[in-house]
Image (cartoon, rainbow, N blue to C red):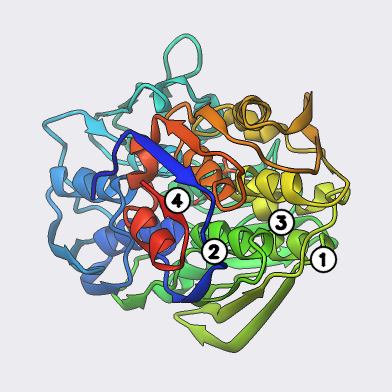
Amino acid sequence: MSVNSTLSSKKAANALNGALRVPGDKSMSHRAVMFSSLAEGTSHITGLLEGEDVMATLAAFRAMGVQAEGPNNGDLVIHGVGMRGLNAPKVDLDMGNSGTAMRLMTGILAAQSFASKLVGDASLSKRPMRRVTVPLTSMGARCATDDNGCPPIHIRGVERLQPISYKLPMASAQIKSAVLLAGLYADGETSVTEPAPTRDHTERMLKAYGYECDSEKVNDQVTTIRLSGGGKLTATDIDIPADISSAAFFMVAASIVPGSLIVLEHVCINPTRTGVIDILKAMGADIKLLNPRAIGGEPVADIQVKYVGLKGCEIDPNLVPLAIDEFPVLCVAAACADGQTVISGAEELRHKESDRISSMVEGLRNIGVEVEERRDGMLVQGGAIRGGTVESYHDHRIAMSFAIAGGVCTDKIVINGAETVATSFPNFVKLATAVGLRIE
Ligand code: S3P
């Protein structure tokens, strides 16, 4: 599973060709582990992402007494303990690099009768957590961050939570989910109103585990999600499709390396996740969705990408939450496009595993790309990619994005701090080399 801490990416000898299946969706994998653990009965999960982030979530539930077999090749069996069946952990719960794990777990743990402490690695320990502890505290939870609003999060036991109607201050599926998960334990109806659509895997998966959860569109952008506390989750079998955020690296690779034609198999194309397709199409990419089908309450398709050459564009800020994790690799697409690309309304990128605006601006400059940094995005001048050494700042998506840039560089690109690729995409180098990228 481990990847060397330095990757080196050379100009692809040939076009990229072939069919590949990238690992299971990370957001769905976290939620499947959480819901199966809290459900009554035994759940069988297939297609689970065996990345370090999801393993941190699984380890946390094991530390609270949940029995599970696996994972083996994406198969995991979890014997749920029910909504009130978790035991007090004897150790700090280490969420590693994962913001999703920490924020969603805070929602669950805030409603337990025992105390717990959530910790993370150096990157996670610098990420903002008041965005979840503030609404949870208003539900009666007793949880606190450090003085800077960062982990560790100390949680004390509570008897009951009160429901709230919460207006999200920003479009964030993690905050929405943390409040909804705490809402499962509240006395009455909890609602969350989001200012723009965000990934809705929590809502869809709650329904798959038999929990009622309603979404009501206020208008085109705004949705309110409601659920009532006190219900139960029922074990189910769940098949997790491939992660569009991992597929995105290859969608961009095939769009920038002349002559490429690839098919990404069995990818989740939930409309709250397909911003990357819309943005690449706006840049002129040739992307086709083949064999659309539904798997476990989520739309799935095979995605065919054929090289045609990209043109720069002004990315619609409304698409930002729908492609939030794909911006690093979209910056690489922009660097290879004809003309300028403008990214705006994307300040949230500064609060990811690294400050993804400054990490990408610095790295792109190091490999010869002209970029202007802006508070909420950047302007990328498309052209040739030379090569050079870049820092990934231990951010998996920054490392993989520059590995993709290696497909078109005139010299080689050396990427430092690439070991975190294993958090979301353990077999990235293997799959990338199988379709024709040259990565060491
Ligand atoms: C996620 C939500 C997004 C995304 C993250 C996964 C989730 O974060 O960036 O990788 O699974 O809910 P925000 O909610 O902070 O935007």
Residue name at image x 31 percent, y 36 percent: 95
Tell me the mark number nearer the camera, choosing from 4 and 3: 3
Label 4 secondary element: helix
Q: Residues within 10 Å of mark 2 (few under 14, many from 20)?
A: many
Find residue 140 and report its horizontal and vertical position in percent: 46, 32
Mark 4 or 3 closer to N-term?
Answer: 4
Identify the residue position indicated by label 4 in the image: 181
Tell me the mark number nearer the camera, choosing from 2 and 1: 1
Identify the residue position indicated by label 1 in the image: 284
Say what amino acid the circle numbered 4 marks: Leu
Say what amino acid the circle numbered 1 marks: Gly
Q: Which sits in the foreground, 348 or 414?
A: 414
Residue 166 seen anywhere in this rendered image of the structure: yes
Find residue 54 and report its horizontal and vertical position in percent: 32, 51
Q: Residues within 10 Å of mark 3 (few under 14, many from 20)?
A: many
Residue name at image x 42 percent, y 40 percent: 8
Tell me the mark number nearer the camera, choosing from 1 and 3: 1
Find residue 181 and report its horizontal and vertical position in percent: 45, 50
Tell me the mark number nearer the camera, choosing from 4 and 2: 2
Is the residue under label 2 in contact with that under label 4 (CB below 8 Å)? no
> Could you give the CA–CA distance between mark 4 and mark 3, rounded to whole angstroms?
18 Å
* Residue 54 sits above or below residue 411 on the image: below
Label 1 secondary element: loop
Tell how many labels: 4
Label annotation for residue 244: 2
